Image (cartoon, helix red, strand yellow):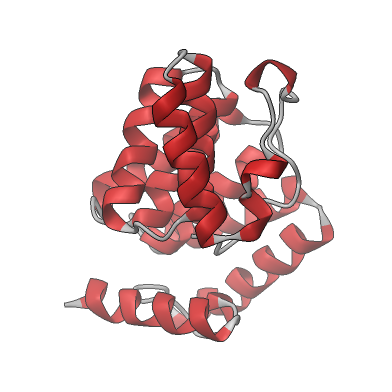
Amino acid sequence: MRLPIFVILCVAAYFSGGSLIAVAPPDVPPSQRVALSQAKELFEKGDYRAAEKAFERVLRAAPDNLYVLSHLGVVRFRAGKYTQAAEALQRAVVVAPDDAFSHYTLGIVQYARQLPNESVASLRRAIELNPKNAGAHYYLSLLYAARGLHSEAAREREIAGQLDPNYSTEGYVDPKKLPKEIPKKFRLNEA
């Protein structure tokens, strides 16, 4: 019954605007909690290489830990290691098939790797698990627009804008004009 506790912590941290690092995730040995905190600090400073190594150390002590796997995926993504990011996130969705954050993040990594079919599947699953994920709706709208599915793209853009004004239709970007990388505003714990 560890996962439900983790889900409760995620929801509490999300709605409180806090960080999950403040409360150690389940299955992380007490000896690794300092390393976990350091990993997040390194990430926030932009030292992705050191953050990746710190998350890997924690993962060796807590194999198949959802929190560590998903955040290792984010760190690797930000470091431009898309293939390794996808590997960590794919492991995360195997460990916890109902974790919306991991599916969403995997969808963005697949989007950046130009794997549209896989990205659509991951983003749809993220939305199925968390229909209020504005980012998932937004990226799905970009993928639909690129496929020429304009009514589906418009529907997803509208939902994204209703959920979060930062994704409003006025802010919509033509997929052909997108940068190769996802903007740095992508943060840990964003779900």
Q: Is residue 133 visible in this depiction of the protein?
A: yes
How many numbered circles are shown? Answer: 0
Q: Where is residue 83 in the image (x, y as percent from the top left)?
A: 53, 26
Could you say which is closer to the camera, residue 106 or residue 170?
170
Q: In which quarter of the image is the N terminus?
A: bottom left
Q: Is residue 87 above or below residue 170?
A: above
Name, please, the residue furthest toward the left: 1
Residue drawn at (58%, 48%) of the image: 74
Q: Where is residue 9 in the image (x, y as percent from the top left)?
A: 40, 81
Residue drawn at (67%, 23%) of the image: 174
Q: Is residue 119 visible in this depiction of the protein?
A: no
Residue 10 located left or right of residue 48: left
Q: Position of residue 29 (x, y in %)?
A: 42, 77
Residue drawn at (74%, 45%) of the image: 49
Could you say which is closer to the camera, residue 147 or residue 68?
147
Q: In this view, does 101 lie above or below 22?
A: above
Q: Is residue 152 above or below residue 160?
A: above
Q: Where is residue 114 in the image (x, y as percent from the top left)?
A: 54, 17
Residue 108 located left or right of residue 182: left
Residue drawn at (23%, 50%) of the image: 97
Could you say which is closer to the camera, residue 105 or residue 94?
105
Residue 2 located left or right of residue 108: left
- When asked about the image quadrant of residue 51, the answer is bottom right
Residue 112 located left or right of residue 4: right
Q: In this view, does 143 lie above or below 50?
A: above
- When asked about the image quadrant of residue 19, the answer is bottom right
- When asked about the image quadrant of residue 26, the answer is bottom left
